[in-house]
Image (cartoon, helix red, strand yellow):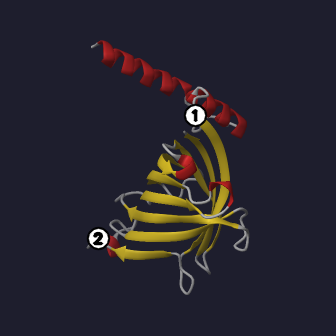
Amino acid sequence: MGNLGAIALIFCSLLIALPSTATSKVTDKEEKVWFQRLCKGKEKVAKLHFYIQDALSNPNATVYEVARSTLTSTSSTSFGQVMVIDDKITEGPHHNSKELGRIQGIITSSDLRVLAFTLNLNIVFTAGKYNASTLHILGRNQILDTKRELAIVGGNGVFAMARGRYIQNTYSFDPIANYGVLECIIYVAYV
């Protein structure tokens, strides 16, 4: 019972330490300080900021449907649709900005009532000081929310044993071209 009590105490301490982004305005500096405090200086900490170029239509599409359920075509949330992505990650919001890598993985429409996706993604860095390293992202993305947060659940290369927060918002979307730009901020701790 002693170990269970210690685990509960640690869990409660983490919950108290979490910044409440849903109810208050937390600055980037406050989030970074919180994250560094959580890591207690034992790990390296980085803040990454980049953009994802999300092309949803041909001829240069980077998102493709690979499966659907019998409900997908009649569902208001496209429930059961499975897509794969291979989007370009850039330094700035413009398509011709310096390429830093790719974000690749699986997106599944997984909510019958709300437009929300389950994401299983890998960020593959192909340039800069993180070249040949990856970060692994997992979680729920309620796409119409202004700010969406997912978990960094691992990594390799520079990001060995990574953990952290992946925060995403829609920077821009062109419905005619069916092209979106997503802004991403990552707080990551690694060995």
**59 to the left or right of 118:** right
Instruction: Give me the C-alpha separation between circle 1 and circle 2.
Output: 46 Å
Q: Residue at x 55, y 53 (%)?
A: 145
Q: Amino acid at mark 1?
A: Glu
Q: Residue at x 66, y 36 (%)?
A: 32
| Residue depth check, mark 1 versus mark 2: number of the one nearer the observer | 1
> Which residue, given by chain and number where applicable, does mark 2 sit on?
71
- Determine if residue 105 is in view: yes
Q: Nearer the viewer, residue 23 or 159?
A: 159
Q: Looking at the picture, does residue 166 appear above or below residue 125?
A: above
Q: Nearer the viewer, residue 46 or 151?
A: 46
| SS of the residue under disc 1 | loop
Q: Residue at x 53, y 85 (%)?
A: 58
**Residue 79 location (% of width, % of height):** 35, 65
> Which residue, given by chain and number where applicable, does mark 1 sit on?
43
Q: Nearer the viewer, residue 75 or 154?
A: 154
Q: Nearer the viewer, residue 136 or 61?
A: 136
